Image (tube, rainbow, N blue to C red):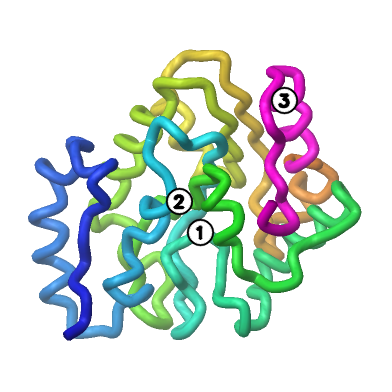
Amino acid sequence: MARSLQIPDAWSLLPFFTSHWPALKTKLAAETRTILPPEIQRFAAFEHTAPQDIRVVILGQDPYPTPGHANGLAFSVAPDVPLPRSLANIYREMEDDLGARPKTGDLSHLAAQGVLLLNTCLSVPAGNPGAHAKLGWSHLTRDVLAEVSRHNCAFLLWGNHAQSFRGDIRSGNHLVLETAHPSPLSARRGFFGARPFSRVNAWFQTRGETPINWIAAP
């Protein structure tokens, strides 16, 4: 029997799961189109780390609309999937910044280190990017940012959409880096050359904390 979708216990007290999730779940159940990622992966971003252990938040937009690409972690794909264009640009910047990049498009090694790879929309109909943008997932994003920012954290807000959630980050001694999105349409307008990965690690080092191993699992 296939495992049903479960809300990770550490995140289950977010207001979203009482106030908005029941109605949103009903809308998803009524969809006749193929919805990505597969239901069992919809909350994958929350399965690796509890809110209090998140160290970096990277906000995506919505999942990849190509079947076989989206896996519940923003920008990530399975190891055998060719790099989508935005991820290829992220890796290009990572290599320029750090001198190396992961061998595959699988970013689960980052999630395991407390990097929350969160799309602001957790579902998309196959072949219809942005079609669920107004379904109500933004309420979850706002709750997550408010909860995670109870402690100091680094936030990478790539593009105008991600930056529209800046006001949901609580005041604190955070590192907030705002750049253009890594999409091919905008990467040359401020994403390339921003060096976000080394800047995050420099911030951790000034705080006496372990940097993120962006390239591979430690």
Label 2 near label 1: C-beta < 8 Å?
yes
Q: In the rendered structure, which disc, 1 or 2, sits on the residue that comes first in sequence?
A: 1
Q: Residue 74 carries which label?
A: 1
Along the line of sight, which residue is nearer the eye, 168 or 73? Answer: 73
Quick check: 56 left or right of 169? right
The stretch in magenta equals 197-218
Instruction: Name the residue at 81% across, 54% down.
Output: 93
Q: In the rendered structure, which disc, 2 or 3, sits on the residue that comes first in sequence?
A: 2
Q: Residue furthest front?
A: 218
Quick check: 151 left or right of 30? right
Figure quadrant of residue 154: top right
Q: In this view, does 41 lie above or below 187?
A: below
**Amino acid type assigned to the residue bearing label 2 in the image:** Leu
Quick check: 28 left or right of 123? left
Label 1 near label 3: C-beta < 8 Å?
no
> Between marks 3 and 1, how big is the CA–CA gap?
23 Å
Figure quadrant of residue 170: top left
Q: Does the magenta stretch include residue 200?
A: yes
Q: Where is residue 31 in the image (x, y as percent from the top left)?
A: 18, 77
Q: Residue 203 carries which label?
A: 3
Q: Is residue 87 magenta?
A: no
**Amino acid type assigned to the residue bearing label 1 in the image:** Ala
Q: Is residue 134 above or below residue 141?
A: below
Neighbours of disc 3 within 10 Å: few (<14), some (14-19), many (20+): some
Q: Where is residue 50 in the image (x, y as percent from the top left)?
A: 38, 40
Q: Position of residue 65 (x, y in %)?
A: 45, 76
In which quadrant will I find the N terminus?
bottom left
Instruction: Name the residue at 11% across, 75% down.
Output: 30
Q: In the rendered structure, which disc, 3 or 1, sits on the residue that comes first in sequence?
A: 1
Q: Is residue 147 above or below residue 68?
A: above
